[in-house]
Amino acid sequence: MSNSHRVTRALCVCGVMLVLSATASAATLARKPPRPSPTPTATSPAPTPTPTVASPTPAPSSSTPAGRPASIPVLAYHQLDNGCAPAATICNAADYESLSQAQFANELSYLRASGYTSVTAAQYVAWAARKTVVLPAKPILITVDDGIENFFSGGTAILRQYGFRAVAFIVTQFADGATVTGSSFIGWDASWSELSSLDPEVWEFAFHAGAQGHSIAYPDNPGCAYFYPCQLPAESAAAYETRVSAEIGAGRLELDSRLWSRAVNDDMWAVPWNDLAQPGSQQPVSGADPPDWLPLWASYLFPVVFVQDAGRNGMLNEHYRLELHGDMTESSFETQLRADISAGNFDG
């Protein structure tokens, strides 16, 4: 989309908001009241995985707008040990999103040795907004999508070992289903109680999808079966926008309600399937409205929107994440991270 086209489309945001305000779901888009500060919970020591513990995390230094880091790398993970042994050097499993615990530990070991310190979601949002914020000398944001239990059980101790923390992007449909008898989510996804009990020094949370947004919701819509970027043939622009905004609004409210005692950041969204219906993307999209409406509307609602298209970094409120896969060697991980930094793909 050209700059002039984007400006023209931006003028439509007010009109979109009028449509939203006319629906009952629009109330769900309001910010929630401040939640009580979480009470730290004691955690029992976890077995120390290999490699050995690195040196203590360095203390953060002050960053001002004049001296702010030009970039903060963002990493995206999904699963651990799904189809491979925890000690596997490379997790060449059928599901490419799964790493082994050994791979994850080796990547964090490299980050620690390189001087990186993880930042919180709030620190990243403030940096992206060019606000004055205290940051470490070499900041990095670690994120984990979907709320899959094997990452929490296998990865928490490794994160703790290397002094890192992470943001878990939660799908409310998955956490809801994790306690429903006969559900395919049981034993795979973490339940709300399991999420609530995670180490607060390691984990915080943000929104990924609601009751349908991560589903293959429309298998009969040729070429575009996803919930967010697919406008159905019989669906008007207003009906499509109401459907998407209502699902996201309800999902955000449920996330805040279920994890009210934990750190939940409402200002960032990791787009499922990397599919924001963004112009030029290779991801599925159907209908005329999604490419123009969804990126603009998301930028109105979320100060930070994560995608995996490096070319979209810096457009609207979009920021690039490097997605890590189990078929990546340690050398390829390090090379790709350095290449993305050199190319300015994480700049903000």
Image (cartoon, rainbow, N blue to C red):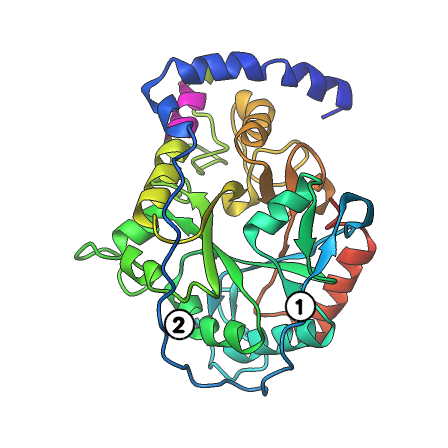
Asked whether the residues under the numbered discs 1 and 2 touch, taking CB atoms below 8 Å apart as contact, a structural biologist would say no
Residue drawn 36% across the image and 17% down it: 23
Q: Which mark is residue 214?
A: none
Kindly indicate the quadrant of the structure image that contains residue 24: top left
Q: Main secondary structure of the magenta part?
A: helix
Q: Nearer the viewer, mark 1 or mark 2?
A: 1
Q: Can you identify the residue that label 1 sits on?
A: 59
Kindly indicate the quadrant of the structure image that contains residue 233: top left
Q: Residues within 10 Å of mark 2 (few under 14, many from 20)?
A: few
Q: Can you identify the residue that label 2 sits on?
A: 153
Q: Residues within 10 Å of mark 1 (few under 14, many from 20)?
A: few
Residue 81 in view here: no
In the picture, which quadrant includes the C terminus?
top right
SS label for mark 1:
loop
Question: Percent from the top left, x then y, of residue 270?
Answer: 53, 46
Residue drawn 53% across the image and 82% down it: 88
Furthest toward the left, the residue is: 181
Q: Is residue 30 above or below residue 322?
A: above
Left or right of residue 312: residue 149? left
Query: Mark 1 and mark 2: span between their CA atoms?
Result: 27 Å
Looking at the rendering, the stretch of residues picked out in magenta corresponds to: 239-246
* Type of amino acid under label 2: Ser
Question: Percent from the top left, x then y, of residue 230?
Answer: 48, 31
Left or right of residue 144: residue 254? left
Question: Percent from the top left, x then y, of residue 2?
Answer: 76, 24
* Residue nearest the viewer, comparing 302 with 134: 134
Q: Earlier in the sequence, mark 1 or mark 2?
A: 1
* Residue nearest the viewer, comparing 5 with 39: 39
Residue drawn 65% across the image and 81% down it: 55
Kindly indicate the quadrant of the structure image that contains residue 113: bottom right
SS label for mark 2:
helix
